[in-house]
Amino acid sequence: MSPVSGEFRASRRSRYFYPVEPELAARVRAVSFEGYYTTMLYQDLEFVMPFDVGRASGATARLTGRDSVSAESMITQALSTNEHTYWLTDALERFVRSAAQNLVLAGPVTYEINYLYPVEGESAAEPMRFRLELIAPGTMSYHGTTPIQYVLSTFGGPTDSTGLTYVELDPQTLVTFHLPDPIEDQVKKIIHFLRAANREQVSGSALLDQSMRGKSGYSFTRHQEELAELFAAATAPIGWNARGLFTYNHLEPYDVWRELKFMEFKTRVRQAILHQLNDVLAQIGSVLRFEAQIELVGVVALSDIEQAMEDMRSGARSIGQLARFAAS
Amino acid sequence: MAGCIERLLQVLSTKNDWQRAVGVVDMGNTLIQRLAERLQLDEARILRHSLTFYLRGITESPAQFPGDAAKIENSTGEWEMFHVAVAERQVLSYISFWLGLVAQIRNFDSAALVSRFEHAVSSLDGCYKARAPRALLGLFEHIASGVDFERRTEGRRVSPGWWVNHLCARLLLSTLVQEVRGFLDEIQKELINPVASADETHAEVVSMKIFSCLELTNKMRTHLETVRHAATVLETLRHAQTDDEKWPDVSFPEEILRDIEEQLYQKLAVVAPLLKHERHNAGEPDLFGQAYKTLFDATFHAILYGRNEIAWKLFPIVIVMAEWARARLIGDLVSERQQQQVIFGTEPLVDVMELSGYALLMNEVNGEGIWPQVRALWDNLLARDQSSSTPQQFANILSAHENLFALTPGGIGRTDRQLELGRLLSRQATHPAQAASPIVAAFSPFLMGGMRHDLADLFIVEYILQRPGMSAIVISRKVEILRDYLTEYRPRPDNSGSEDLDSYDLDDDEPDEE
């Protein structure tokens, strides 16, 4: 059992920390958003939930099920791990955003269900609340079949053959979120490409400098054209347009098409996270004895996006109308 | 290439080679037409400018040619031929351009255009095979590159056909509209203004340029409908949902053509009296006859459509030229039978009577016009007629023509003009019952009974017979009928006009045309 949190005792074993030790930092950095292009994608994924979510005219989250009213406060607190909020919509928006960013940049994301027990009283053996604790991407591994988290040596504990300190985790309390099947592999390749592009990004100025000094036949324009094509081809499965950095050879419908595809990607990711989160709530509900599911209302559905794509093909809507839809 | 042609023409502009220079100009004009047919409008325009620059240089400053054209000028006959050939071809470049353009767009249809656009953007090679104006070619290139990019990056084409069609149709239409408007401006600046300010010393050359310019404006007016048809076809490719503010306005300022033509008529009215009007030589173009016919038709249309200012500018010139034409015809027909001499030799006088009749009628129709000036002119002319035989002579001429049962060019022309009048009046829907003027009622196309009054007869009835002492002159049967008609229809002080109307058979249907 981990230290007591307020009037509750937590079941949490994983730790939250800044990876100040070099070996840990290297593991975390390998899956982080660090880098020019990956940072941009990371930021763009902030809008995996519509930007107007929670506003008067925008989408909202609500609970359904038998205990939708009584469980709302508990679920809201459970999701708002680091940023306290009283609103389910806000808590869900932050949870989904964080999960999506980690899923895309780092791959499958594991949370530890942190059951909270009363410190005193007759019901001390029964958890009353829970929190979903993110296990920082890059810190989780397995020791044999036992899940572990690498932690700072200052926390103390066993070390593995590389000398890294770790804590063992309870597999019963771990839940791992995945991207949908065909997307996961595609995204992995895209992130691999973007990390490579991050590394190459600095070479452009050196080549330009050489060209200006007459030492090479480097053409900035040609370089940009090739980058445009490489980026477009590599990111085609998700439609990300690198914030419009590369527009060479882009036709207006193509740009809108890419916006729609990115919108479709974000929607699939959001739906996948929400679906898995509801599975987790069902699992936790069986322990805490509540029955509630989260529903997001007022958001663009996949069918809306598919209709928009069909409208582009048929001409039922103008490119301008579709661009406005894609920006919604 | 245009530069090469310019240099070649300069070298050929010599006494010995000027005919070859004219041949090169002819080939250039053919090429202009072909380029315009392929919608290579920029290229066609550049070549046209080169030829125009050369031809204008010959007529305005021949000494600039090293060859030199001035030497031709010294050999009078050669120079005249060269000058006339150049004058003809100056306008021909524009006509070639216009005919080439309309030949291409005449065949526009939606399905063919869609297929053409699709083919042009579906591959990078396709766009270069498309016959298109430069701007559209640029768009084809842009879209073809984009589509190719989409195939490479997405594995499929993304940009839809309707978007391609909309963009290409908009640009093509915009190019056409700009081309036509620009062409009108260029005609004004490069052809009409120089002609309008031309020195009248070379009346033959100036009149030849005027005829060519009028041929061009006539072709333009005719084929503006073709351009409108093309615009309608292109409109079918417009994507309605796009609500495109950039879609071009396709209205053409047709009054520019009318203004251009009126400038040309006015100039012709100045130079026509300077043309030779002696007996016609079959070996030379009949510039005087052509000028007379052109001015007569222009005056008729100006009267008919209420263009009073230009009508009155031209009318006195036509009267003078008609008299010269009559005198010339007498000489030309001297070897013909007497009846032929009477019929054909008097046509110009029938013309002026008819034209005067139109001036009178349209004054009645519109409540304004040039009839007061025309009447004053006749008053003046007849007052100077010492023999006083002219009125009877006029009546006799109409009698002679009444008894003629053959189709003559003059008679066909008069019928055509009556049909045009009928169309105009039927558009105004002036029913005899509503017509305040008995004259208007008499010429109403709704009047049934088969009697079609002549405008020359109207002149006799309403002007000649109204002159003092003219009641005794012998008139033709048709003139008599018209006189009786008007007398009966015209309201009398003791009776109302509406009762008189009852005796006429009125038809509400469309006017019957001859």
Image (cartoon, coloured by chain):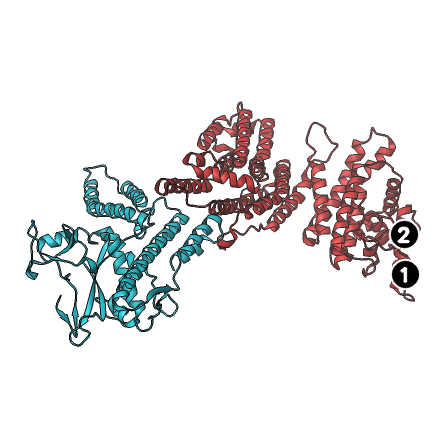
Chain colours: A cyan, B red
Q: Nearer the viewer, residue A158 or B391?
A: A158
Residue B429 x %, y %: 76, 56
Could you tell whether B172 is left or right of B305 in the image? left
Asked if residue B468 shows in the view, the reply is no
Asked if residue A44 shows in the view, the reply is yes
Which residue occupies the extreme bottom position in the image? A121
Q: Is disc 1 placed on a helix, strand or loop? A: helix
Q: Residue A24 sits in which quadrant?
A: bottom left
Q: Please give the name of the residue rendered at 81% of the width and 40% of the height, measured from the top-left corner.
A: B411
Relative to B122, is B174 above or below? below
Mark 2 → mark 1, Cα distance in angstroms: 27 Å
Q: Which residue is mark 2?
A: B470
Q: Which residue is mark 1?
A: B500
Q: Residue B274 sits in which quadrant?
A: top right
Residue B208 x %, y %: 63, 36
The dot on residue B22 is none
Residue A105 x %, y %: 24, 52
Chain bearing tag 1 is B
- Tell me the amino acid under the disc marked 2: Met
Relative to B319, is B75 above or below? above
Chain bearing tag 2 is B
Looking at the figure, which quarter contains the N terminus of chain B?
top left
Which residue occupies the extreme top position in the image? B16
Of the two numbered discs 2 and 1 on the same chain, state the one appearing first in sequence: 2
Could you tell whether B170 is left or right of B327 in the image? left
Residue A242 x %, y %: 30, 51
Q: Please give the name of the residue rendered at 18% of the width and 59% of the height, measured from the top-left corner.
A: A135
